[in-house]
Amino acid sequence: MLDHDADDKETARALRSGARGLLGADVTAKGLLSAIRAVADGETLLSSGATRILVSHFLSAPSPGLQRAPSRMLSLTPREREVTALVAQGRSNDEIAEHLRVSPLTIRTHIRHSLRKLGASNRAQLVAVAFKTGLVSPAFARTV
């Protein structure tokens, strides 16, 4: 985990090295425990600062494996698009499940389908695709 004051290079290096969770120094004990559980369940958890850096680097780099065209989002069902947008807003699977009144397992299934359909290999790439295709904009991303 990195302090929220860590520079962009350290955050980018941690993400490239396979970090599955980057939290700010102000994370609470409850938030830390929740983050550990989420990462253990296969999720990727990023602070708002890490998300900003990831999206910035992703948008500035060529992306041969991920199409920019919003039509790529049309391959998702309306519910998969909704879940993808909520993921990109920084919500956890449990928060999305509660918001949509479905089980966390259903949310994981929607995310898995979205990853496959969009050619993304992890949650962080899913977030980047959501921003890049215009499904969400930085103004709608929440902070962790």
Image (cartoon, helix red, strand yellow):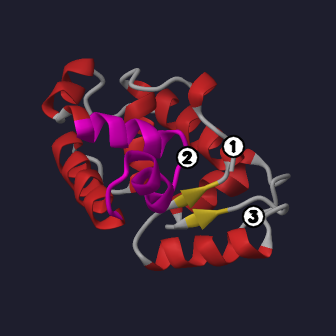
Q: Label 1 neighbourhood size at 10 Å, few (<14), some (14-19), many (20+)?
A: few
Q: Which residues are magenta?
A: 79-103
Measured Cα–Cα span from mark 2 to mark 1: 7 Å
The residue at the point 24 percent across, 57 percent down is 112
Residue type at the position of mark 2? Gly
The residue at the point 25 percent across, 29 percent down is 67
- According to the picture, the residue beneath numbered tag 1 turns out to be 143
Number of marks in the image?
3
- According to the picture, the residue beneath numbered tag 2 turns out to be 90
Measured Cα–Cα span from mark 2 to mark 3: 17 Å
- Kindly state the secondary structure of the residue where label 3 is placed: loop
The x and y percentages for residue 107 are 31, 56
| For the residues bearing labels 2 and 1, Cβ distance under 8 angstroms | yes
Comes first in the chain, label 2 or label 1: 2
- Compared with residue 52, is residue 139 higher up or lower down, i.e. above or below? above
Comes first in the chain, label 2 or label 3: 3
Side (left or right) of 75 relative to 129: left
